[in-house]
Image: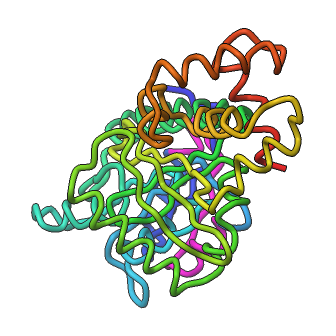
Amino acid sequence: MNFNHETILVVDDSAETLSFINDVLEQAGMDVLVALEGKQALTIASQIRPDMILLDAMMPAMDGFSTCEQLKSSALLADIPVIFMTGLSQTQDIIRGLEAGGVDYLTKPIEPDELLARMRVHLNNAKRAASAQTALDTTGQHLLTVNRLGRLTWATPLAQQKLAPLLEDPIMLSSLSAKLIQWQSTEPNVGATLEQKFADVTIGFDYQGQTPQNEMLLRLIDLSEDQGPKKLKDRLELITERESEVLYWLANGKTNREIALILSVSPRTVNKHLELLFPKLGVENRTAAAAIALKILSI
């Protein structure tokens, strides 16, 4: 079972365990980094981003659960798959590891073939997720994912830029996390929006559904009064004020029916506005019109 030189960080306070796992992984064609405790692991991961982390649950100072929680709190490191390794086998310990952000749990002593088989599954899953995220990164959309703890686990570059003031304020970020946890508990319908004010803007988190990792996929909407439509109208001088409003909500992923409800008009009226908009923008469909609007709104 050969691997393609993936970089694996192994974290364990036992030198014997580190040596054993290092030999197994190197023979399988992987590059191995090692750490003896949690803080050292976090430092290494931030400097040399590994493809996967094998993490001992029970370590002095900072245990594996706390290490994993800190790792998952970083938007840059949160999507690294973590497999816990421990002598603990109680159900509550396994649940604790998964709640901390682990994707799997192996009980010591580690069986090499089982370890490699599970690593292969989770590395492949991570690569598929990364490919999908890369595709979204290049589409110019304001998308992000949030886990069950209300923490940001991934965001497109545009979403990161929009949320930068919030992410730099621990108090506001904590408040948003609490709101997201409570919101998830209500099981919102697709299209539902959670509002959050920060700096001089009001941002809407528009629920798009669940990811395969059971995380919320959200689209950011700028709800600041008239800011988005006004920007579109100023840049696209041929369109009317109402057309700019329709285009704005179209760019934010709303259907004709949803736009009609927001603007207090009929869906047929929304469709008429779109029929006039498309030739003015030189496009033939909703996707192309939304792409033009997204480029303007992201500047």
Count of marks placed on residues = 0
Q: Position of residue 147 (x, y in %)?
A: 39, 57
Viewer-nearest residue: 170 or 240: 240
Q: Is residue 225 above or below residue 299?
A: below
| Residue at the bottom extreme, as displayed | 61
Viewer-nearest residue: 225 or 68: 225
Q: Is residue 237 above or below residue 97?
A: above
Residue under the image location 35 percent in, 40 percent down? 210
Q: Position of residue 99 (x, y in %)?
A: 28, 63
Q: Is residue 33 magenta?
A: yes
Instruction: Locate residue 122: give its quadrant.
Output: top left
Q: Is residue 216 above or below residue 241?
A: below
Residue under the image location 46 percent in, 48 percent down? 206
Q: Point out the stretch of residues depicted in magenta.
A: 25-45
Instruction: Locate residue 288: give its quadrant.
Output: top right
In this picture the colour scheme is rainbow
Q: Position of residue 89 (x, y in %)?
A: 15, 62
Residue under the image location 63 percent in, 62 percent down? 224
Residue under the image location 54 percent in, 25 percent down? 270
Q: Is residue 221 magenta?
A: no
